[in-house]
Amino acid sequence: MLFTTKNLVLSAAIGVSLLLKTVTLNTHAHTGISVRVASPSETLMNMDFLYLGQHRLINSPHYAAEIYLHRSNDKACKGLLYLLPMPDNSEAVTLLESPPGFKSQDSFYLLNNSLHSTFPAYRLWLDRLYSRASNLLGLVYEDPLVVGVSVTSTCLEVRNLPWQQIIQEIRSV
Amino acid sequence: MSANWSEKYLICALIYAGLTNALIRPVAASIFENGFVNALLDSFGVNAAVWFSIGLISINLNRCGEAVQRIQFGIVPLIVMIGLMVPSATVAWILVAVLAGWILQQSDDHTLRSAASILVVLALRDPLLSNLSQLFNTEILALDTWMVSVLVSLFDQAVYHNSNLIQDDKGVRLIILKGCSSLTNLSYAFLIWYSISKTYAPRLTVQGAWSLLLVITSIILFNVTRLALMSMNESNYALIHNTTSHALQSVLMLVSVLFISFWGAQCFSLRRI
């Protein structure tokens, strides 16, 4: 018999699973690197940094760094600050550490309020796993984002800036 | 007889429900963003290798006849069914792999086992590749870049590599990103080779092993040559990187992998050609 109770229950379960999938379908979700909207940080601009705009590090809209110029009276301290969101993986590390046309004096990576000297691939993987598991359970957990920072000035102490606040401003766009 | 038929229907329905759950997002996104005709030309945002292996899974399921009727519904299919309600493609792929693993354990019919093992490879390819490329991206790209720099340096001694950059004294010539890596193409090529081998030559032969080696070599050589040519000059880059050329390269790669894999599965002999 095709229409047994067991078969009807199993078919209904398959149907419900597909229906739920269609209802919760999000075709605009993050599927890899995407083009980001320019998002100047108020905090940086209040700290003598002038926002210069976005600068493409490769010949496509992906990997556009947000660039700031430090308006210091001391000429030696004048320099550029690059902020590069790296949502997916470490492929843009070389672009950040040696930006075309400039010599980077210091570079580091920010992930969930912690600062890393090298790209935190393992930590990003763990955070993403945790984020996806939380989202599946209905808990809201922001997708982790690594932001690379590179500076061309030798005397700017950029590691001590309020990065937690700055990253929030960048993410809010 | 009709009860057995319905049992087969349900096992197959569960497999297709799992595959639909895993693929519906990229397919829907492709149709909504590009329209149906363009999505069709782009194989609905999913690599042609995936559709090809699903086709061979269907052929195997169709061939296996009564073998699937001997499988009794147990706790595993029920868990898979409940799990498929979770709105996540990765979870769907893992559940499909679990279901396929369960079928492998339940059946000794080689056609059904072929369908299940292709399903395992298909289902694990995506999560495995995604995690590998997140954890070891630097190393994977560095290997590709090293191969490209070795090839380019045969013609141009000024070229060297630094992590995933091809450089010369004037600056950066080419950056190799995840999408250009040989690993992604290799995973699709392996999926095609495995699907054909399991469907047409279930036992691995010497010719089959050689064909796998040929598939791997040809994919790496093709990708490295393409990247090396792009790093030579800007006009090469523009020519190779445009959409038409990209589609042509994909077709060439697909045809060569299909040809080598069918040869490996002894579907034809080169002497007859």
Image (cartoon, rainbow, N blue to C red):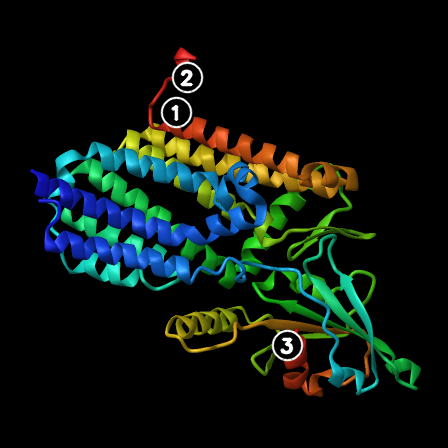
User: Residue under circle 1?
Assistant: B263
Q: Secondary structure at mark 2?
A: helix
Q: Nearer the viewer, residue B74 or B229?
A: B74
Q: Nearer the viewer, residue B66 or B252?
A: B66
Earlier-in-chain disc, 2 versus 1: 1
The part of the image, by quadrant, that contains residue B34 is top right
The part of the image, by quadrant, that contains residue A161 is bottom right
Q: Mark 2: few, some, or many residues within 10 Å (few <14, many ≥20)?
A: few
Q: Secondary structure at mark 3?
A: loop
Q: Nearer the viewer, residue B266 or B100?
A: B100
Which mark, by number, is residue A172? 3
Q: Amino acid at mark 2?
A: Leu
Residue B248 image point, x, y percent: 60, 32
User: Residue under circle 2?
Assistant: B270
Q: Chain of mark 3?
A: A
Q: CA distance from mark 2 to mark 1?
A: 8 Å
Q: CA distance from mark 3 to mark 2?
A: 61 Å
Q: Are marks 2 and 1 in contact (CB under 8 Å)?
A: yes
The residue drawn where x is 35% and y is 33% is B196
Q: Are marks 3 and 2 on the same chain?
A: no
Q: Amino acid at mark 3?
A: Ser
Residue A106 image point, x, y percent: 73, 75
Q: Is residue A42 above or below residue B249?
A: below
Q: Amino acid at mark 1?
A: Trp
Q: Secondary structure at mark 1?
A: helix
